[in-house]
Image: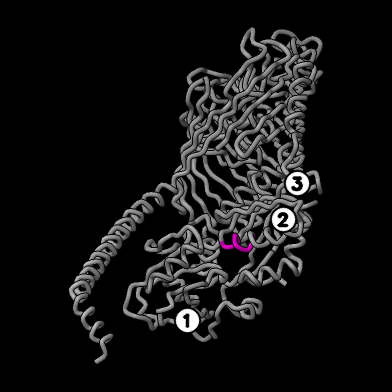
């Protein structure tokens, strides 16, 4: 055996305890490492469980959607105390005002086939309920939706076009008159297929109290409201044509024996009065027929534009000075039966991504039997509720970002000029009233 | 009042026509985000004057951004819904412009250790609606099927629900992952997991072959099977713009659907539209 081999064996023997200890240390480290991995795995499993738990909670919360918008505005009218459909009449001695026109908060619980919606409106005037409804979608072909509660009346286009999206600050005069508050208490069925041949058609129809969204039923009648719509997209041409026909078939019940309507035999088209005692409790038709059309076209470079129009005609039972629908409450109120008609045309031109130009012309004639020159002639008993109005509105919208937009809008309101002999409440209508209104609005929507 | 009106009008016009941003923004589908980033990188290297920002978030998020005006291009792995087009009409008075930018075979992922090789569309539906819960029924181990799915803002989720589940709801046991990469990652680590997503994401997992029904031939999502339509879950990947594109936006989109742009589609793992 060579000396070097002896030396190696001696070194090995001397190092043996160290090797043994190192092996023990290695084993201990391995054991510790294994233990740490196990602990880590346990922690990860625990975190996974927590994550799954949190995810379940998050998934449930995702079904709740909260949205809202605030419209704060400054308005200036031609004169103090101007009567206006641009957000309500100006109070006495008031020519300009700041106001919160709408302050909406909407909670929507969307469980795919079922839906809960509650929307409130908070302004300087207090809190009001706008929407409160539940809806169920059919689980088979997912085309039918049944809704019950307080929601938009299914008539025409402008009612269901959200105030936060609508370009003009307010709906046209005829809609504000015929459908105050836009919403009603009732139940409706909606058919609207997502795909296939029938997807171009949609139908909404329902029964309603025929009063207001914040009032109780006041007679034995239920009013039918429905719209059959069609939407024709021509994608290759960047063109879309939508439209629909609508029907409101309802009744109001009078609490007065006095029933007024225009006497067709009268050369001056005076009102005639039926004062039979048996009139009390009679029902009279509140019937509107409407047609609407919307055309959308993408103008190269400039942006999309839309041209929308609606026409409504029918019979409106109202009261003496008001052409809003007859809703007497506890007060005994004579009923006035008028044939009415109204229409509007609205042009919106997008200019790039952030700007929009708006022009709108709307007309509401609450009594189509009468010309302006006939209104207020001696012995006719006509009222301010018979006067026709037209409004030309011009405006500009600037979208600051996805949430904020500014609106500048100017309403030029014209009334028909009544008979030169008109007196009393009709006398101011012998000339055009000074009731133009400028609106500057900021809207925040989320 | 006329002077006040004039003053406010001037203010509006001043704000309204401030300088517009020239950058092209792209937002939407997570399935498409790798492809969109690759397109942007290559295009910007050749057109340094153009800046393109790409973000994901899901097709639903991208479409919402298109509607609220915060993106120029929306990437979507599903067609826009009628309700979404209505919102676009309301805000921009347009229907939107749809551009088919690529094709994708929506792949079924399983762990590499899973012996199951193929499924019919009906079997996939049974698995994801919770009617079938054990791999044994499909020739696999006697083990519970672990379902991985996507969030409901994902176009892939919507496409899968509409076209594979035929509108039925996903099983409550399905775990919703934030992106396709997360689905792939989960399946790669889970022997009994199954997931779905774009074919370009199939790294570290195995594609199941899919067949129309029991009597059909099963196919993997390959260029041939997707192009021919033999692979049963084939879809287009879309880009949407609000209006007909012009200027730099048009040039970029034209490049994407050119041969050069479509070559990148192939390189990333999807399939060209032509």
| Within-10-Å neighbours for mark 1: few <14, some 14–19, many 20+ | many
Is residue A36 rendered to the left or right of residue B32? Answer: left
In the rendered structure, the residue with mark 3 lies on which chain?
A: A
* Residue placed most toward the observer, A340 or A184: A184
Is residue B25 rendered to the left or right of residue B46? Answer: left
Label placed on residue B118: 1
The residue segment tinted magenta is B31-36
Residue at 70%, 35% in the rendered image: A313
Label placed on residue B42: none
Residue at 55%, 33% in the rendered image: A69
Label placed on residue A295: 3
Labels 2 and 1 within one chain: yes
Q: Earlier in the sequence, mark 2 or mark 1?
A: 2
Distance CA(mark 2)–CA(mark 3): 17 Å
Residue A63 rendering spot, x and y as whole percentages = 44, 48
Quadrant in which the N terminus of chain B is drawn: top right
Picture layout, residue A197 above or below residue A318:
below
Distance CA(mark 2)–CA(mark 1): 37 Å
Q: Are marks 2 and 1 in contact (CB under 8 Å)?
A: no
| Within-10-Å neighbours for mark 2: few <14, some 14–19, many 20+ | some
């Amino acid at each position: 055996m060579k000396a070097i081999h002896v030396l190696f064996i001696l070194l090995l023997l001397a190092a043996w305890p160290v090797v043994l200890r190192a092996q023990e240390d290695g084993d201990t480290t391995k054991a510790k490492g294994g233990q740490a991995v196990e602990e880590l795995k346990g922690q990860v499993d625990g975190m996974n469980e927590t994550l799954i738990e949190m995810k379940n909670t998050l998934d449930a919360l995702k079904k709740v959607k909260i949205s809202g918008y605030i419209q704060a505005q400054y308005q200036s009218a031609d004169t103090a105390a101007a009567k206006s459909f641009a957000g309500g009449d100006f109070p006495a001695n008031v020519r300009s005002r700041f106001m919160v026109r709408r302050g909406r908060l909407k909670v929507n619980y969307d469980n795919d086939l079922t839906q809960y919606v509650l929307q409130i409106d908070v302004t300087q005037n207090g809190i009001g309920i706008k929407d409160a409804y539940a809806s169920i979608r059919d689980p088979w072909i997912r085309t039918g939706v049944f809704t019950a509660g307080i929601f938009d009346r299914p008539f025409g286009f402008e009612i269901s076009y959200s105030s936060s999206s609508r370009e003009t600050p307010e709906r046209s005069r005829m809609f504000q008159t015929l459908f105050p508050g836009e919403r009603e208490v009732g139940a409706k069925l909606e058919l609207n297929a997502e795909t296939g041949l029938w997807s171009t058609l949609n139908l909404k129809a329902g029964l309603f109290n025929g009063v207001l969204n914040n009032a109780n039923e006041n007679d034995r009648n239920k009013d039918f409201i429905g719209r059959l719509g069609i939407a024709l997209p021509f994608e290759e041409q960047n063109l879309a044509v939508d439209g629909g026909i609508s029907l409101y078939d309802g009744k109001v019940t009078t609490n007065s024996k006095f029933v007024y309507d225009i006497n067709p035999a009268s050369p001056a088209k005076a009102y005639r009065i039926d004062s039979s005692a048996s009139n009390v409790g009679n029902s009279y038709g509140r019937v509107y027929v409407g047609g609407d059309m919307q055309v959308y076209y993408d103008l190269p470079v400039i942006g999309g534009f839309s041209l929308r129009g609606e026409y409504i005609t029918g019979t409106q039972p109202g009261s003496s000075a008001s052409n809003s629908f007859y809703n007497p409450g506890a007060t005994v109120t004579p009923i006035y039966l008028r044939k009415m008609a109204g229409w509007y045309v609205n042009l919106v031109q997008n200019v790039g991504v952030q700007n929009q130009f708006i022009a709108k012309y709307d007309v509401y004639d609450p009594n189509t039997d009468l010309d302006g020159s006939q209104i207020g002639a001696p012995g006719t008993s006509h009222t301010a509720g018979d006067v026709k109005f037209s409004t030309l509105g011009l405006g500009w919208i600037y979208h600051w970002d996805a949430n904020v937009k500014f609106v500048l809008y100017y309403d030029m309101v014209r009334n028909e000029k009544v008979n030169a002999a008109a007196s009393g409440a009709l006398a101011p209508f012998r000339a055009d009233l000074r009731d133009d209104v400028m609106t500057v609005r900021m809207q925040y929507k989320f | 009042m006329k002077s006040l009106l004039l003053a406010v009008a001037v203010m509006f016009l001043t704000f309204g026509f401030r300088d517009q941003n020239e950058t092209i923004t792209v937002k939407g589908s997570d399935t498409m985000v790798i492809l969109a980033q690759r397109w942007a990188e290559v295009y910007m290297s050749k057109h340094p004057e153009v800046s393109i920002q790409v973000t994901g978030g899901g097709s639903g998020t991208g479409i919402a951004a298109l509607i609220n005006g915060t993106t120029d291009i929306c990437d979507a792995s599903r067609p826009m819904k009628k309700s979404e087009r209505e919102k676009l009409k309301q805000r921009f008075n347009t229907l939107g412009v749809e551009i088919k930018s690529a094709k994708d075979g929506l792949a079924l992922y399983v762990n590499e250790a899973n012996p199951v090789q193929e499924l019919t569309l009906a079997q996939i539906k049974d698995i994801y609606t919770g009617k079938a819960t054990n791999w044994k029924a499909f020739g696999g181990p006697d083990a519970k099927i672990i379902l991985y799915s996507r969030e409901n803002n994902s176009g892939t989720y919507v496409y899968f629900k509409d076209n594979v589940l035929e509108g039925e709801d996903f099983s409550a046991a399905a775990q919703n992952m934030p992106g396709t990469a997360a689905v792939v990652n989960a399946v790669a680590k889970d022997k009994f997991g199954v997931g779905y997503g774009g074919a370009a994401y199939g790294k570290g997992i195995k594609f199941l072959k899919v067949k129309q029904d029991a009597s059909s031939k099963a196919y993997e999502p390959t260029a041939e099977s997707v192009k021919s339509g033999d692979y049963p879950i084939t879809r287009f990947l879309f880009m949407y713009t609000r209006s007909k594109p012009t200027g730099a936006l048009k040039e970029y989109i034209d490049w994407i659907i050119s041969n050069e742009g479509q070559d990148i589609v192939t390189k990333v793992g999807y399939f060209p539209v032509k």
